[in-house]
Image (cartoon, rainbow, N blue to C red):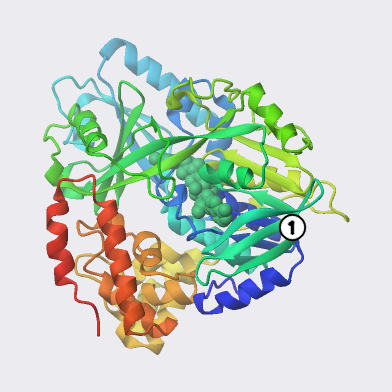
Amino acid sequence: MPGELDARDRDETIRALAAGPLDVLVIGGGITGAGAALDAASRGLRVGLVEYRDLAAGTSSRSSKLIHGGLRYLEQGDFKLVREALRERDLLVSRLAPHLVRPVPFLYPLYRKVVERPYVGAGLVLYDAMEGVKRPVPHHRHLTTRGALRRAPALRPDRLAGAMLYYDAQVDDARYTLTVARTAARHGALVATRAAAVSLLRDGARVTGALVRDQESGREFEVAAARVIVCAGVWSDLVHQASGITPGYQVRMSKGVHLVVDRSAIDADTGMIVRTSKSVLFFIPWDERWIVGTTDTDWSGDRAEPAATPQDVDYILGEANRVLARPLTRGDVLAVYAGLRPLVAERPPADKHGADKHGADKHGADKRAGDAGAASLAGEKPTTKLSREHVVDAPLPGLVSVAGGKFTTYRLMARDVVDAAVAGLPGPVPPSVTGQLPLLGADGLPAVRASARRLAAGSGVTLGAVQHLIARYGSLAAELLDLIQADKTLAGTLVDGYPYLRAEVAYAVTHEGALHAEDVLARRVRLLIESPDRGLAAAPEVVAIMAGLLGWNRRRRAVELHRYQDFAAANGAALTAPATLPEIAAEVAVPA
Ligand SMILES: Cc1cc2nc3c(=O)[nH]c(=O)nc-3n(C[C@H](O)[C@H](O)[C@H](O)COP(=O)(O)OP(=O)(O)OC[C@H]3O[C@@H](n4cnc5c(N)ncnc54)[C@H](O)[C@@H]3O)c2cc1C
């Protein structure tokens, strides 16, 4: 059970999926699908996962990257959601993924002297209390105005009336999703990316698997499974519609945009959360940069690459500049990214009857996680008001689907949907064990951290490079150092000014299933959102390393490079900077 997703073994994985039969086939490789695959595989079931594009290519690489209870959900009265999320946060920080999920302090600036401090203070007392007794993150604290400005000199001092300091946690969302999928593979799950479920297989009313298209070769194959679990996020409705099924909920898409700016643009040693007229705005420290966002607007366009608009950028800058002493300008913005929240709303009764029209007799009741999300006002409620709780539905025998929720609570979503899926399977199926299952890379972490100096000396890379690897891969850093031992050229950095090593590109192919340059630059390393050129300068190097491992010829390398250039250009469209893109592209010669 190696837990490697070696891109070179993909054909073998596809053959094994087609050979079936599986106990459970999961459709969708975001955090929910990866979590469901891990939950089911670690219960001893034979599991497959098919992902239409790349792991985390949907919403799960485009979030605010917080593992949090969600202060604002407390204000909305979603107590159950907040309590569950805080417990999950603490479990991930302390036991399941301490290498990936890190506590981060947040400053909540106060502007109304008399009323705000008691109100926010009471909220934070509750927030801290909901966590339980054992807490891996510190309690909140009250700060005076002077104390607040010491932590965040960037704040405008004129209206400031002090601040609260509290803690949440943050994560590289794409890396986390990948690690969950790898841990599932470690427990026997067959994970195939660029494999789309095009329709569901049926035996009468019962769902018996899925017809899957290999997006790389165009070939289609059937995967037989006793249970199919749909974890397709904002694509859920499409997956259901393709087979004429109408589940009891519908997914409403809400677009959220973030800006990335250099760390030097905002002088603060803590994250910040400030109120906006509609919701809240986060300033989230992200290594040498800040992530600032987000927006929350209805969306009905392209699901795969939702576009941020210049108006989104201006809105975020405007809200940020209400509190910053030195205003941010468009020139400060290194990158913009947009994601779609898969919010669930109950389907209007008229639509529900549509399910019967299609012969989809309802099998089992909807299971709504909590009661706060009974949003029967699809199309009417603003998306900021829709619950972030999840819904599990079983619209047909053999088929279960889950949607909604938050990244933070993925493990609970996975547990609930697998519980619903395995009901009625022959033989006993044990309950979920993921609460006791550290992810790959968590094992032996304290010892690896303590050995960083020795590992650096032994492998010939700097201590800083080893620490960088440990911070991203935990104890799996040893595997990257092994690659470097075998090929010293992999010890170099990928591009100036960023800590990513060439070894990380090779590892992305041999251990993390990367099939294209986009998979590496957008999700294995995060240059797409961290560098002003969106990773274009690194792209030729990435393509060259991948070509060596995947046997790409000169033509294929050129195609890969152009494909990435197009992708990067589309991702930069919201900024006024695209005029520079042709210049950058011209500098990036197609490798011979
Ligand atoms: C702007 C924004 C900020 C957020 N911030 C936070 C935060 O800070 N903390 C938090 O806890 N949550 C946050 N969230 C919510 C969180 O990111 C999402 O709830 C979560 O990522 C959804 O994961 P998912 O697996 O359900 O969906 P996705 O990640 O979208 O995964 C669905 C996958 O299904 C695949 N798929 C679709 N159709 C098919 C098919 N036919 N065959 C095969 N595969 C298919 C897609 O390619 C996709 O990869 C945020 C969301 C947004 C948009």
Label 1 sits on residue: 43
Could one spot residue 204 in this view of the protein?
yes
Left or right: where 155 falls relative to 250: left
Q: Which element carries disc 1, helix, strand or loop?
A: loop
Residue 219 image offset from top left, x and y in percent: 58, 70
Left or right: where 216 falls relative to 564: right
Residue at 22% from the left image edge and 41% from the top image edge: 268
Does the beta carbon at disc 1 come under 8 Å from ligand 1?
Answer: no
Residue 528 image offset from top left, x and y in percent: 30, 58
Query: Badge 1, how many Cα within 10 Å: few under 14, some, many 20+?
Result: some
Q: Quadrant of residue 344?
A: top right
Identify the image quadrant of the N terminus.
Answer: bottom right
- Looking at this view, name the residue that lies furthest to the top: 114
Identify the image quadrant of the C terminus.
Answer: bottom left
Seen from the viewer's position, the closer of residues 289 and 298 is 298
Seen from the viewer's position, the closer of residues 237 and 429 is 237
Could one spot residue 93 in this view of the protein?
no
> On screen, 309 above or below 92?
above
> On screen, 29 above or below 413?
below
Residue 421 image offset from top left, x and y in percent: 75, 47
Q: What's the amino acid at mark 1? A: Arg
Residue at 72% from the left image edge and 57% from the top image edge: 209
> On screen, 389 above or below 400?
above
Q: Quadrant of residue 112?
A: top left
